[in-house]
Every structure is written in structure tokens, then in C-alpha cells.
Amino acid sequence: MFSGSGTAIITPFANDKVDYEALGKLIEFQIKNGIKVLVPCGTTGESATLSYEEHDQVIKFCAQKAAKRVKILAGTGSNSTAEAITLTQYAKDAGADGALLITPYYNKPTQEGMYRHFKKIAEAVDIPQILYNVPGRTGVNLLPETVIRLSKVKNIVGIKEASGNLEQVSQIVQKTDRNFTLLSGEDSLTFPILALGGQGVISVVANIIPKDIAEMIHAFAQGELEKARELHFKMFELMKAMFIETNPIPVKTAMGIMGLCSAEMRLPLSPMAENNVQKLKKIMKDYRLI
């Protein structure tokens, strides 16, 4: 359902308010360049600093603007199970096609705790749900055996894997049903994850180069492995540049440089250090984005 090329879309701000005019233009830019899934209100969308009202309105706006031309996979995770249920229910009511649920952060639940957390959300809200494992952000790693257990819950349909552990990816692909979708959550590992049986990506760098990401995923699906490999290496330095500072600082900075939207972020995120801006600009120039 959510396979193929996806973008973890940023939330543009202007004077500390969500810039819906810019967001609408970004959605059109993504669709025009072949992206199949848009993921609002995730980590890249600065969900941690969105109010409940903003969170709800951004999802609703994306669903209405996309108008079923692409899938909307809304970020609705929380370290509170009750809160995640509330956010997931709203996403369903707002017209999202599915929910992306990050592992609970800060409170560091056990594997059993995470199993119960995700199972309860799935049972409470009848909408397709994708697990999101990113231990570098959350402090907990959703292990393959837990993912395998959760894959048997009816509306848990896949996982976004950003652990960086290809052995873990291998175990999940090998031991879950073929209908369970594994998506790359780390741009620089998307090509090898596809080779292991992954079915797509939720990408950060696609905010600025959606066409190339979409082409790589399509080429791999068509068996054009050399073309996909060439695109991977073409994008590799730019992919890595998106993480020279905490995401989404680099990608928002790049989008500001390109004139796609303001580079404005909310505290505690701060503008990129000038030396890193210069590194980013060089890589963007080499890529002919500027």
C-alpha cells in the first residue's frame, strides 16, 4: 500500500506559523516529480514542536491538497500510547491513508512494552499503520522478533527501518509475510535495502530531489539495477549532506537556498553553522541544484 518513493515532507514556517501557501507548492512539486507517498508531521516535519491543532491541520491540508493523487501517511506517533491513539484517530478522520508510528521515545519501553503500545493503537484505530524504528532518535531499538510479532496484527502493514542495521533489515524481510512492507528510513541505505527486499523509501533528500529518488525506486522495481545503482551514487554525497547537522536543519537550509520555501525552523532547532552552510552549498553546486 505504501511501497515506492515517499517523502518525509518538511513543515514550512513563516514568522513562526505554518506557511500553508508554501506547503501547497511543495506538495505539487513532489507530485509533479513522481513521488508516490507524502509523510507529513514526521521527524522531518518538526512534529515535536507542532501544536495539536497545527498537527491536525497540516495532515488535513495535505490530504485535501493531494486529493488522492498520492498516498498520505501521517506521522502520529508519541511516547504516550493514549496520545498516539488520539493523533491517529484524527489522521484517519482528516483523510490520511495511513499512520506512521515512531517507537516511544525517552521513556525507553521494553520490547514487550513496545509490542503492547503498537498493538493497542492498531486495535483502537482502524487505519493501516507503519511502524517507525529510529533508535538514534528514540533511544530504543524495535528488534526483529518484536516486528515479526507485530506484523501479525491486522492493520500493521509495514515498517520504516532507520536503524542502519542491514542484518536487522534482513531478518525482518526474511521472517515476515510478503505483504508486510519494509521501507528504508535512511536515504544512503535505500539501494542496499531494496536489494534485501525493501519495497521503497521514506526520504529526506526527496524534499529537494524528488525526481531522482522516484527514478531510482522505479528503476530498481523494473529490474534496471545498474541505472538504480548509478542514481544511488549520484545522490550519495547529497544524501549524506542532509545529516551534517540534525535533520531537518540541512534539508530546510537547502530548500531556503533553492527558494522552495523559507529555511525557518522552530527552537530548539537553530540555523545551520556557517561552515556547514558552505559545505552544503558546495555539494549542491556539484549536483547543479544551484
Image (cartoon, rainbow, N blue to C red):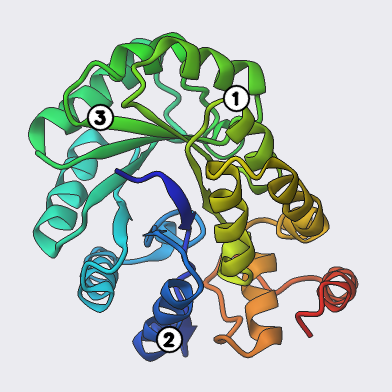
Residue receiving disc 1 = 196
**Cα–Cα span, label 1 and label 2:** 35 Å
Disc on res. 25: 2
Q: Quadrant of residue 176?
A: top left
174 or 95, which is in the foreground? 174
Q: What amino acid type should be assigned to the residue bearing mark 3?
A: Ile
* Vertical placement of residue 103 versus 242, above or below: above
Q: Quadrant of residue 115?
A: top left
Residue receiving disc 3 = 156
Give SS at disc 2: helix
Tell me the residue at 15%/42% (across/down): 127
Tell me the residue at 10%/39% (across/down): 125
Disc on res. 221: none
Q: What amino acid type should be assigned to the residue bearing mark 1?
A: Leu
Asked if residue 88 shows in the view, the reply is yes
Label 3 Cα crowd, 10 Å radius (few <14 / some 14-19 / many 20+): many
56 vs 238, left or right, is left
- Circle 3 or circle 1, nearest the eye: 1
In primary-sequence order, the first of circles 1 and 2 is 2
